[in-house]
Image: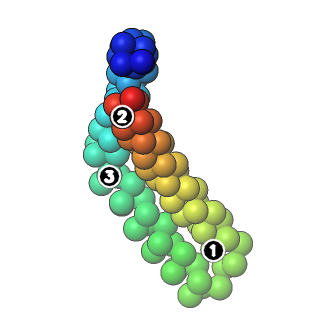
Amino acid sequence: MFILRKLFKIMLLPVVFVLFFIKWLLATSLKLTESIVGLLTMIVGGGIIYYLVCKRWSDVFLMSLIFADIMALLLAVITVQDWCDMLIEKIGAL
């Protein structure tokens, strides 16, 4: 059984490399774009406040959708990173 586990681990080694590369790629892209995403989030937040004061409800709705899309994209990236971590740990625990 021990030999079978080690053989299975060796067979899954390319999968671990792919998962590690995906995780590294997402982390690097987040680090490179964090200032741009932060600035865009501040602009959208300021736009929402401005349009609320001006009572332009359709623009508030559009800016809220843009803000929700930004947050959903960031959540998706973090979720994929967590899945990669979880899968790497499970393969390592074999």
Q: For this view, does 79 lie left or right of residue 31?
A: right
The circle on residue 60 is 1
The local secondary structure at tag 2 comes to: loop
Image point 59% across, 84% down: which residue? 52
Q: From the viewer's perspective, is residue 82 above or below residue 56?
A: above
Disc 1 marks a residue whose amino acid type is Val
Q: From the viewer's perspective, is residue 65 above or below residue 24?
A: below
Quadrant placement of the N terminus:
top left
Local crowd at mark 2 within 10 Å, few (<14), some, or many (≥20)?
Answer: few
Instruction: Indicate the quadrant where residue 43 lies.
Output: bottom left
Q: Position of residue 16 (x, y in %)?
A: 38, 24
Residue 13 is at least partly visible in this image: no
> How did the renderer colour the structure?
rainbow
Q: Nearer the viewer, residue 35 or 1?
A: 1
Image point 30% across, 38% down: which residue? 28
Which numbered disc, 2 or 1, marks the residue that appears first in the sequence? 1
Q: Which residue is under mark 2?
A: 93
The circle on residue 34 is 3
Which numbered disc, 3 or 1, marks the residue that appears first in the sequence? 3
Q: Nearer the viewer, residue 23 or 28?
A: 23
Q: For this view, does 82 lie left or right of residue 92?
A: right
